[in-house]
Amino acid sequence: MHLKGSVVGRLQAEQQKQVQDFQEKVLERAKRAKEQAAREALEAQRLIPKATSLSTSMGTKADTNSCIKKEIHGQNVVIKRSNI
């Protein structure tokens, strides 16, 4: 019985290690995706000139304080109009 217990313990430890490795990889991929979305949002801000923003040029003060909400690669990104 002792031999079976040690084998089972080793298999459980191996499985736990594999789960931890997988979780770390998933978190790293999510971090990279978030960073990529942030880079793309910054690039988008630089590509939209102020003069072409209708709410900025024609809207009320409340409109100019609103945000642009966009989904990039499954990440929700909020761009403040005051930064455009």
Image (cartoon, rainbow, N blue to C red):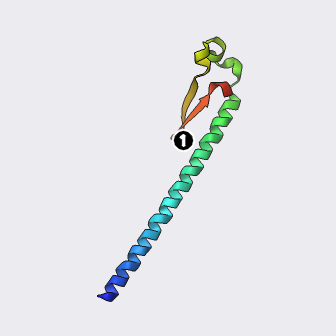
Q: Can the viewer see residue 81 in this picture? A: yes
**In the figure, is residue 41 to the left or right of 30?**
right
Q: Is residue 82 above or below residue 6?
A: above
Q: What kind of element bears circle 1?
A: loop
Q: Amino acid at mark 1?
A: His
Q: Can the viewer see residue 84 in this picture? A: no
Q: Quadrant of the C terminus?
A: top right
Q: Quadrant of residue 83?
A: top right
Q: Is residue 25 above or below residue 79?
A: below
Count of numbered circles on the image: 1
Nearest the viewer among 43 and 55 is 55
**In the figure, is residue 7 to the left or right of 46?**
left
Q: Quadrant of the N terminus?
A: bottom left
Q: What residue is drawn where x is 55% and y is 53%?
A: 29
Q: What residue is drawn where x is 61% and y is 21%?
A: 65
Q: What residue is drawn where x is 65% and y is 19%?
A: 53
Residue 10 location (% of width, % of height): 41, 79
**In the figure, is residue 5 to the left or right of 21?**
left
Q: Is residue 22 above or below residue 33?
A: below
Q: Which residue carries the number 1 mark?
A: 73
Residue 9 location (% of width, % of height): 38, 78
Nearest the viewer among 51 and 63 is 63
**In the figure, is residue 8 to the left or right of 76?**
left
Within 10 Å of disc 1 (Cα), the crowding (few <14, some 14-19, many 20+) is few
Residue 43 location (% of width, % of height): 68, 35
